Every structure is written in structure tokens, then in C-alpha cells.
Amino acid sequence: MAGLAPAPFGAMILADLGADVVQVKRGGDPGAGVVPPDGPLDRGKHTLTLDIKDPTDRETLHALVDTADVFIEGFRPGVAERLGIGPNELLSRNPRLLYARMTGYGQHGPLAPRAGHDINYIAISGALDLVGRPGERPLPPANMIGDFAGGGMLLAIGVLGGLYERERSGQGQVIDAAMVDGSALLTAFMHGMHHNGLWNQPRGQNLLDGGAPFYDTYECADGKYVAVGCVEYPFYVQLLAGLGIDNPQLPFQLDSTGWTELRDVIGAKFKERTRDEWAKTFAESDACVVPVLSPWEAHEHPHNAARNAFIEVNGLRQPAPAPRFSRTPPASPEPSIDLGDVQWLMSRWRGGADKVD
């Protein structure tokens, strides 16, 4: 069911991996529903427009579900049931169906019926508190953690796990994918660090949150930035060499009491040259120094170009499908196809047509 980013992103991943995905847009009056414009999340999908409140269109959807492996919806809890497309209804028709539910707060709990967005879900999961500079407010990392990494990606993993389990049991089930759960899951490593006394400082003052001068970003002469991640000492030595820093009086790398001094010295050096000049200097080094690129220029980086990490679909540049498969690489995604009516699709799923006329 078409909607905002998380569920369509999860379905895009499945389409990239070869699934036959039908995106159902809501006809009639969608109420408060918001559907974003067509773009990368629609690639590789067939699109139908159905008014689920209309009995005839609802029965069309039911007929599609009868032959489907997976049904994905991103409504608030209870909405799908009121529309007559809840799990009880659909699983009674197709007991092998995986009914995947993508929400912010999940299907139960005090906040389950409440509205929210990425920033809200990652706030209560603990993920948002990790991002930001010392003494400053938490900084939302766009909507990547909740909507995509902890949302759509979690949904796709749940579907794949459900399909694998169904091969053994022969039974479908409901998958409750909540962004608050997924974004919490992404902090598992930090919980381990905290338990072992390695992540106990305030935000922005720990090893991997920008607190360490050897794991941070630095401004260059042109106002652009480089990212430095030389945690291991041999890599840190290469950083100093590449910057031309040879000072035996510098504080030891892991002595946090000297991090301010180290940051000042390293920062002053990076200010002497442009981002791309530094990128060239460190291109053949293990100092873990790379340019900070915008999403709109990332395709130009030689490594991304060599791996064809970005593609064009219908004239729109976007990230390529991932991960890579040696024997069954996914086909290059095509733009979404608006079917107009359901007959071709029903024929295809029942072993008939293999292309759109």
C-alpha cells in the first residue's frame, strides 16, 4: 500500500532483489494520507490505483492478495482493519501470506495510536541523543535512521526472514516492524560500549561521536570538509605523516585530556589546502581520510564510479541496488509501470503474460 517513505523503501529493496512488487495507490478520497511524488522508491514496481473504500476495488485487492506472498501496509494500528484489509481478513483468505506492518511505534504500547515522524521515533529509542556536538542540542541526521535504516530496511529483513521460515512451516504470519524498535536496534553496539565504560561521556565527547580528533570531520581551505577515521594507531601515524606533522611533544593519541590540543593542530593543517587536494594526498594511504561529498556529487568519486554505485532510472540519478550477488545479480531497475487495470497482473501471477503490452 503506497504511503510515506519507510514501507515504500522496504518494498523498493525487495523489488531490487527481484520481487514482483505491486504498489497500490489509494483512489477516491485518501483522507489525511500523503503520497510523495514518484521517484527512486517506486522503481521496479507495478502501480495500481484502487479506492479501498469501494467494495469492487476492495475485492480486487483481495483477489491480488489471494495469490501474493507478502502484503505490506504502513497505516496506523487499526486503520487497515477498518478498511477491510486487516491481517485476520487477508490471512483467512491466504494462510501462507506474510502480512508486514510498518509503523513508527508498533502495533501495541501507549504510543501505538499516536502520530509521529522519524525524529520522534529515534528520540525515544535513544538514537537521537547520540548525534550532535558537545553542549549543543541533538542533531537530527535527516530521516535516515528511523524511516530507512530502522524502518524500511528492518521491514525488508523481516519479510525475508518470514519467507525463509514459511518454507519450513508452510504458514504465514504478521510482521510488526516498528521504527522505534529498529532505531533502538541500531544502537546495540553503543550499549555494549557503555556497559564496558567506553561510552560514558556527554554527547559529542566519546570515541566515535566526534569527540576524538582522529574520528571527526575537518574544514578545508575551500570551506568543504574531509572525514577522518584513523582509530588504529598505525593509521593515525599515516595521518600525521600525510599532514606533515612531526612533533614528538604531541599528546598520545588515546589520551582524551589532550584531544583539544590534537584537534587544534590537525584542524589547522587541514585549513591549509582544499578538500580535493587533501583527498588526492590521502588517496593511496591507510590514514582513513576521504572527502565529505554531497549526495549529488557522490557518483563522481572514482570508487563509486568503478563500482557503478549510482545509476539512472528514467533520467533520475539514484543509488544502485545493493548488496551485490555473484550468481544472480539483480536486473537494473526500471521505472514504475502504471498498469491501469488489474487483468494483466492477475494473468502474470497465474503464469500467463510475461510483459506489459
Image (tube, rainbow, N blue to C red):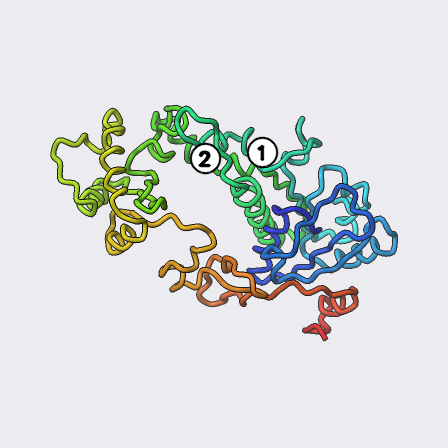
Q: Are marks 1 and 2 in contact (CB under 8 Å)?
A: no
Q: What is the quadrant of residue 229 in the picture?
A: top left
Q: Secondary structure at mark 1?
A: helix
Q: Amino acid at mark 1?
A: Tyr
Give the residue pinned by disc 2. 188
**Vertical order, 27 against 235 (above or below):** below
Residue closest to the eye, 280 or 176: 280
In the image, residue 85 lies at what x, y percent? 78, 47
Q: Residue at x 81, y 41 (%)?
A: 82
Q: What is the quadrant of residue 241 in the picture?
A: top left
Give the residue pinned by disc 1. 121
Q: Residue at x 49, y 66 (%)?
A: 329
Alpha carbon distance from label 1 to label 2: 16 Å
Which image quadrant: the C terminus? bottom right
**Vertical order, 262 against 61 (above or below):** above
Q: Determine crowd level at label 2: few under 14, some 14-19, many 20+ residues with C-alpha closer than 10 A.
A: few
Numbered circle sitting on residue 325: none
* Label whose residue precedes the other's in the sequence (1 or 2): 1
Q: What is the quadrant of residue 74 in the picture?
A: top right
In the image, residue 257 lies at what x, y percent? 25, 24
In the image, residue 140 lies at what x, y percent? 51, 35
Q: Residue furthest bottom?
A: 357
Q: Determine crowd level at label 1: few under 14, some 14-19, many 20+ residues with C-alpha closer than 10 A.
A: many
